[in-house]
Image: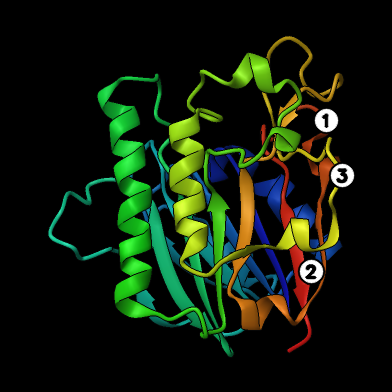
Amino acid sequence: MRLATWNVNSIRARKERVLAWMAAHRPDVLCIQEIKVTEEAFPSADFAAFGYRVVVAGQRTYNGVAILSRIACQDVVRRFDDGEDEAEARFLAATVGQVRIVCVYVPNGQAIGSEKFSYKLAWVRRLRRYLERHHTPQDLLALCGDFNVAPEPRDVHDPNAWADTVLFHPEARAVFHELCAWGLLDTVRLHHQESGLYSWWDYRQLAFPKNHGLRIDHILVTAPLAARCTTAEIDRNARKGQGASDHAPVIAEFAL
């Protein structure tokens, strides 16, 4: 299975780029975030013409996630269903073949000390509780998406400069590591230990040409799936050119 995740930063603005990327890379499953459309407005027919089934958890203008798969998705879930607020479309889970795929768009957090930052931390903890309720670390499970957290200093071009921001603050990193402690491994780090690997670059200050980025998009997997992970990479080329998303796709392959 070739599995990818990508924050496309508006499927309407980026549809042609996404279709071209899929034609070139032919993932079996693509999880996308920040689609910024409702399920009805998602261009499913364009992806169906490429041979992909689409499931969507969307909303107008903001957020939204989708799973695009060569085979039908089963047991689709769009909510934590934990009794707390779920107005924002940030979570989608489905079974594809043998694997449970969970696609998430973790809140950004806006500013340290703000209500939105507290919401971000709480949302990640809710995600862990969802996994505890519905799955075990022995399942074949992949948790994919834009986590808006760079886990380690080697995942940030300038750790000191980013230390007090929502993407690299100690509290944000702590809840990310708490999530992983449930039983998740980072596919990129299974195959690459070097620094300088990033998945997001600000549009401003020539961040991309200077490689001033952060690795905030991840494919996290349980140990049984990690044992079958043959490669993982970040496709930096997808960030190039006019009209690109500010994120690059992360890709992992599994011998299934």
Q: Kindly state the secondary structure of the residue where label 1 is placed.
A: loop
Q: Amino acid at mark 3?
A: Glu
Q: Is residue 7 visible?
A: no
Quarter of the picture containing the C terminus is bottom right
Query: Which residue is disc 1 drawn over?
Result: 241
Query: Which residue is disc 3 drawn over?
Result: 194
Judge from the rendering whether residue 62 lies leftward or rightward of residue 146; answer left or right. left
Q: Looking at the rendered structure, which numbered label has been put on residue 13?
A: none
Indicate whether 254 appears above or below 146: below
Q: Position of residue 192 (x, y in %)?
A: 85, 54
Q: Nearer the viewer, mark 1 or mark 3?
A: 3
Query: Which residue is disc 2 drawn over?
Result: 26
Q: Position of residue 138 (x, y in %)?
A: 52, 85
At 76% across and 25% down in the image, what residue appears? 157
Q: Kindly state the secondary structure of the residue where label 3 is placed.
A: loop
Q: Position of residue 64 (x, y in %)?
A: 42, 49
Q: Amino acid at mark 2?
A: Arg
What distance separates the C-alpha of mark 2 from that of mark 1?
21 Å
Q: Amino acid at mark 1?
A: Gly
Q: Position of residue 204 (x, y in %)?
A: 68, 13
Q: Kindly state the secondary structure of the residue where label 2 is placed.
A: loop
Query: Nearer the N terminus, badge 2 or badge 1?
Result: 2
Q: Nearer the viewer, mark 3 or mark 2?
A: 3
Query: Nearer the N terminus, badge 3 or badge 2?
Result: 2
